[in-house]
Image: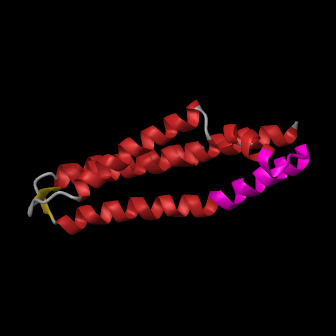
């Protein structure tokens, strides 16, 4: 967690320095589209890494509790849908909307200060998704220990 915080601080400092230099520089639409592509790739990577492991843990819980398939669908629901997960999802949707709106800008010469903001939103989006996965894994691992 400390390494993630240090990385986030470094990213914010780099973004702050870059925004001073880039604020006056025009950026291309491709620069903004690249931020959107980075967000999509980062999210795919997180899902690719975490989904199989999480599903395996859900199956372990199903086996441990002896749930039928129908019972599993009912009992596993709180591990993938609750208020905290909904809050992570809403926060992620907000960041993704900011990134997408910036990437779809129709201006020919865009302000790179906005590009720096979008990159910050990308970093926050990825951190939000990491926090969501951590929360979900903590929740399922706690049940498996019972």
- Residue 138, can we see it? yes
Which residue is found at the position 42% from the left and 61% from the top?
A: 40
Front residue of 17 and 38: 38
Would you identify the image quadrant in which residue 36 lies? bottom left
Residue 122 image offset from top left, x and y in percent:
38, 52
Return the residue nearer the eye: 122 or 17: 122
Q: Farthest front residue?
A: 70
Q: Residue furthest bottom?
A: 30
Asked which quadrant contains residue 24, the reply is bottom left
User: Does residue 141 lie above or below 69 as drawn?
Assistant: above
On whether residue 67 falls in the magenta region, the answer is: yes
Q: Residue at x 68, y 41 (%)?
A: 77
Vertical relation: 57 (above or below) 34: above
Residue shown at 69%/45% (left/top)?
137
**Colouring method of the image:** secondary structure
Is residue 42 found left or right of 80 in the rendered image? left
Task: Say whether residue 47 is left or right of residue 55.
Answer: left
The residue under the point 33% across, 53% down is 119
Residue 39 x, y percent position in the rendering: 40, 58
Quarter of the picture holding the N terminus: top right
Label count reads 0
Where does the image place residue 19, in percent across and percent down from the top left? Answer: 22, 50
- Of residues 145 and 7, the one nearer the viewer is 145
Q: Which residues are magenta?
A: 50-70
Quadrant of the image containing the C terminus: top right
Q: Main secondary structure of the magenta part?
A: helix
In the image, residue 62 lies in the stretch drawn in magenta: yes
Q: Nearer the viewer, residue 110 or 7?
A: 110
Q: Is residue 34 left or right of residue 110?
A: right
């Amino acid at each position: 967690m400390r390494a993630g915080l240090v990385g986030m601080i470094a990213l914010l400092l780099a973004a702050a320095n870059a925004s001073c230099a880039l604020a006056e520089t025009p950026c291309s639409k491709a620069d903004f589209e690249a931020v959107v592509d980075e967000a999509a790739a980062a999210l795919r990577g997180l899902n690719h890494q975490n989904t199989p492991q999480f599903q395996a843990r859900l199956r372990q819980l199903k086996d441990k509790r002896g749930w039928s398939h129908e019972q599993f669908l009912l009992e596993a629901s709180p591990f993938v849908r609750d208020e905290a997960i909904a809050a992570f999802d809403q926060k992620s949707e907000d960041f993704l909307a900011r990134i997408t709106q910036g990437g779809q800008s129709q201006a020919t010469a865009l302000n790179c200060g906005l590009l720096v903001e979008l990159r910050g939103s990308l970093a926050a989006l990825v951190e939000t998704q990491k926090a969501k996965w951590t929360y979900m894994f903590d929740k399922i691992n706690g049940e498996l220990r019972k």
